[in-house]
Structure formats: structure tokens, C-alpha cells
Amino acid sequence: MKAVVATDYGPPENYVVADVAVPRPGPGQIQVRIAAASINPADVVLPGGQYREMTPLEFPHVPGNDFAGTVTEVGDGVTAFKVGDEIFGQAVPRVLKAMAGATRPSLSTGSLAEYAVFEADTPLLAHRPPGLDVADAAALATTGLTARALFLTAQPKAGETALVVGATGGVGTALVPLLAAAGVDVIATATAADVALLHDLGAARTIGYTDAYPRGVDAAFNLAVPGDRLTRIEQAVRSGGRVLTITYPLPAKERHDIDLEFVLDLDGELGGMREVAEAAATGALRATISRRYTLDEGPRACADFVREHTTGKLVILMRRGCPLRT
Ligand SMILES: NC(=O)c1ccc[n+]([C@@H]2O[C@H](COP(=O)([O-])OP(=O)(O)OC[C@H]3O[C@@H](n4cnc5c(N)ncnc54)[C@H](OP(=O)(O)O)[C@@H]3O)[C@@H](O)[C@H]2O)c1
């Protein structure tokens, strides 16, 4: 089969499309023919080598976590899925084992490929609802899960104000509509080109990355700034307010009159992919896809993700005949 492959540590410009063996499912596993996969920061950060001590890679390495596809083979003991099921979710590649959750983790081959193998018994996989197309499902796996976890942790109330830093990215474009639908007054960071999109997603106001942040907001969500550089974001929050952050390194609180929470729900305790599917089916979660690529364009997609401004998600469509634009 064809897959996007990193042959050594290095930037995504070094990735190639190569022929690799089709992975076969063992007990408790399923094989999936991938229809669409979306790119996340970890897909390019890990092959970059920055974390090679903590999460060493074996080469050739197939990156990719988020996917939508069709079950093509099931291993012994699998009851949750059968051949022909349309599913989506997070693969959690084997390389992320050190970061995988405590309940049965999904440790798989990477999803930027024609086929991948996943652990079946995990809340990180679900059936794809009929109204959710493969590209949107692949775009919403990590972003939907994370946006829901942020929302449920923050417990925002109607009439509150929230600053969203990194609103233009994958998680941000999923979170802003959730907040807006709850009646939250959202102030979102945006490039000039993304202002109209952010308003369409429900932001009441947009500000540039380097503009002065507003003061006195009830909640601030950090989806972009490194976790050890949150001073400006903490200062935006009113006394008694809260900061929710998802980036590394782990943050250290500078103000003692606010709550600061690092949100990471590896086990789907705040809701797994089934809840993402339900929220997508009702329209509460919306996918924002800025660019679509073929599998042959996969290395370029990964390079674009790193080198260019990211709006929403970049999605790779694996199957011939999958429309690139819908
Ligand atoms: N803890 C968790 O559960 C969890 C889950 C998912 C993701 N994450 C992490 O959360 C972060 C966001 O993930 P993502 O998938 O949304 O990434 P993404 O798609 O790359 O989005 C990040 C967005 O933030 C923007 N941005 C960068 N610097 C900014 C700044 N100083 N001010 C305002 N906006 C800025 C980026 O724009 P430019 O392209 O212009 O830089 C981009 O639009 C990543 O670090 C990721 O590793 C954590």
C-alpha cells in the first residue's frame, strides 16, 4: 500500500510517499481502509526529533492520528466493529505509547496511509454518522474531542466573555462555535484573512495575535502559545476567572486569584468519539477544512501545515475518486 513515510528524523519536506506492507490486525484489533486523514501538530513534531529521547521512532515511520475509513478486517475477540463499518477517530500511533491513556489505549500504525490497524476497544473510535462526510469526520476527531473537553471543563455560562487564543486553528475552529452556541461572548485571535471565518463561526470580536488582549474576561482558552508563556493570557482574566490551556510545556500559574487548568483527556473520560459523532450530527461541532490533498500530495500537506498559516484543518483524501472539493 501507499503511505506517507518519514525515513529518518527531519522536517516534513523529507517525507516521501512509499510502498509499505499492509498492516494486519491482531487479536482485539481492526484493519481500516483509510478514506481521509487530517494532520495534527504531533504528526510533524515527533518525526522532527525534538522528543526523540521520550518517544523514539522506528523508521520507516508513518505519521497520522485522525482518520475516517471503512473496517476491512477484524481480529479475534472484536465485537464493537464488523467488516464494512464506517468509522472515524484517533489512531494514537504506537509512537505515542508513552502518552497514551491508562484504559486500553489505541496503539496503531499511522493514519496517513491507505490502510491502518487500530485497537478496537477504545472510546477513541466510533461509527461515523451518515450525515458526516469522511473529510469532516477526519477533521473533527482530535479537534472535536479537545473542544468538547475544554468546553466541559470550563463550564461556560451564557453572557460570559471568553478570549480564545489560537482560534484560527483546528481546535479553535471547533471550540468557537461551541462557546458561541452557549451564549458566550467570544473574542478570538485571527489573522486579517480569517476575520470573516471567525465571525461566521460565532466570534463576537476578533483581535490580531499581537494586539493588546482585553482585560476582565471570565475565561481564556490558550490553544497556541507555549504553556510557559501564559503571562499575557492570565492578565486578561478577571479575578476569580479561569484559564484553560492545552499546550506544552505544562503551565505554572503566576496569578493566585484565578483558576488555571491544563486540559488533556487521553481516555475520553469527558466523552469519546461517540459523543463527538453525536455533537457533529446535531451541528454543535462543525469541521473547518481549509485545504484538501491527495495521498500523493501528503508530504506537501505536512510541509504546508508547518510552514504556512493554518486555518482549520488540512485533510488528505486517500481514495481515488474521493472529491477533493465538496
Ligand atoms: N492537550 C490536548 O488535549 C491537545 C489536543 C490537541 C492539540 N493540542 C495542542 O494544542 C495546540 C493547538 O492544536 P491545533 O490542532 O489547533 O493546532 P493548529 O491547527 O496548528 O492551530 C494553531 C493555531 O494557532 C495560531 N497561532 C499561533 N501562534 C499564535 C499566537 N501567538 N496567537 C494567536 N494564534 C496563534 C496558528 O496560526 P499560524 O498558523 O499563523 O501560526 C493556528 O491557526 C497544539 O500545540 C497542539 O499540539 C493539545
Image (spheres, rainbow, N blue to C red):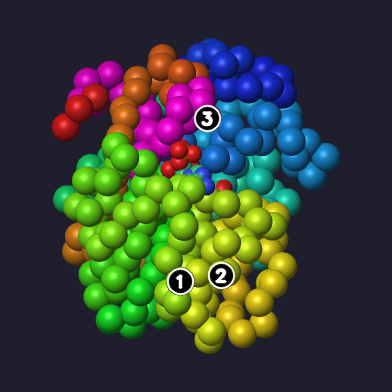
Tag shown at residue 78: none
Ranked by sequence position, the earlier of labels 3 and 2 is: 2
Instruction: Identify residue for label 1.
Output: 215
Tell me if mark 3 has few (under 14), some (14-19) or many (20+) residues whose alpha carbon lies within 10 angstroms of its own.
Answer: some
Magenta residue check for 43: no
Asked whether the viewer can see residue 104, the reply is: no
In this rendering, position of residue 95 left or right of residue 196: right
54 to 18, vertically: above or below: below
Of residue 234 and residue 108, the one placed in the foreground of this image is 234
Asked whether the viewer can see residue 319, the reply is: yes
Identify the element where label 1 is drawn.
loop
Q: Position of residue 186 (x, y in %)?
A: 32, 65
Ranked by sequence position, the earlier of labels 3 and 1 is: 1
Q: Quadrant of the C terminus?
A: top left
- Magenta region, residue range: 302-323
Tag shown at residue 235: 2
Tag shown at residue 306: 3
Label 3 vs label 1, nearer the camera: 1
